[in-house]
Amino acid sequence: IKGEWCIFVDADDFFAVNTFEVFDKHVECNIDYINFAISFYNINEDKYDYNPPSFSNQSVLRFLKDATITNCLYFKLRNTVCYNKLVKASFLREKSIRFEEVPVNNDVFYALQVGLLSKYYKVIKECLYHKLIVNSSITNRKRDIHREYLFFIQAIKRNGLSAMLGLYNYPFYRSEFLYIPHLIKKRGVSDTLRFFKYRWQHNAEVKEAYDVYRNKFNSLTRVDIENMVNY
């Protein structure tokens, strides 16, 4: 990484016109990263949504509104995208932070490391990044069973971390029972049965996934998260 600060973004998204002026205003030597708000831009409708259905962005807005312990946990554990964080390069090198080499949600582990391994950070209210929404994109297409399972595996990894921290309530921990109504609504009964058949055929992999993130953060406690300092 060259330079003092970096941000990982999607190629088809775009920044607000004043983004780098805002960055210059807020960068400080004693913080590890800056977190900011985002919007969704629907290219088909030519419309911006500044309160999008995104766990990551909702966690930022909740924390800005009221920095309670619950909202701090929400901000640190459910804020799992890379493109709403400007991160100090020396911090990434010091903590050996990398992206997870997986087919889906590969920025989740990166975002968790940034959030959970930092001590000093700044959360700002400015909306600096616009995520492009295209109705026909691969993200919005119906997933096949295997791809649906890959997203499920990533959720199981997050479950293991949440359980280690004693957080068994939604949205920190998503019980497999919650997938039943979710998948029936999304895919219908037949596909839901096919999904769970596929899941049980790969039960050993599911059990292994449960321990992946909790092993990476095994020295972390809820108190550690609550004591992280927001500037």
Image (spheres, rainbow, N blue to C red):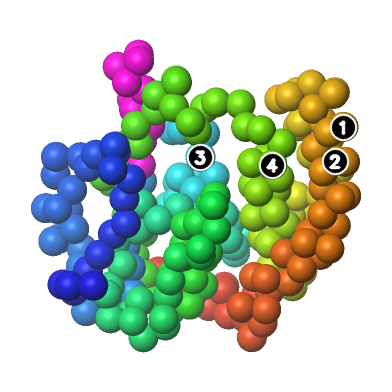
The circle on residue 35 is none
Q: Where 78 sits versus 144, above or below?
A: below
Check whether the beta carbons of the residues at disc 3 and disc 1 lie within 8 A of each other: no
From the image, tell me which residue sits under label 4: 146
Q: Earlier in the sequence, mark 3 or mark 1?
A: 3
From the image, tell me which residue sits under label 2: 196
72 displayed left or right of 83? right
Residue at screen point 25% across, 64% down: 6
Q: Where 125 sits versus 211, above or below?
A: above
Residue closest to the eye, 67 or 121? 121
**Residue type marked 1:** Leu
Q: Earlier in the sequence, mark 2 or mark 3?
A: 3
Residue closest to the eye, 35 or 107? 107
- Position in image of residue 61 (x %, y %): 45, 46
**Residue type marked 3:** Ser
Secondary structure beneath label 4:
helix
**Residue type marked 2:** Phe
Q: Nearer the viewer, mark 1 or mark 4?
A: 4
Tell whether position 199 is magenta.
no
* Dot 3 alpha-carbon crowd within 10 angstroms: few under 14, some 14 to 19, many 20 or more: some
Residue closest to the eye, 37 or 150? 150
The circle on residue 193 is 1
Classify residue 177 by image quadrant: top right
**In whole angstroms, how far apart are the C-alphas of marks 3 and 1?**
28 Å
Secondary structure beneath label 3:
loop
Q: Which residues are magenta?
A: 38-50
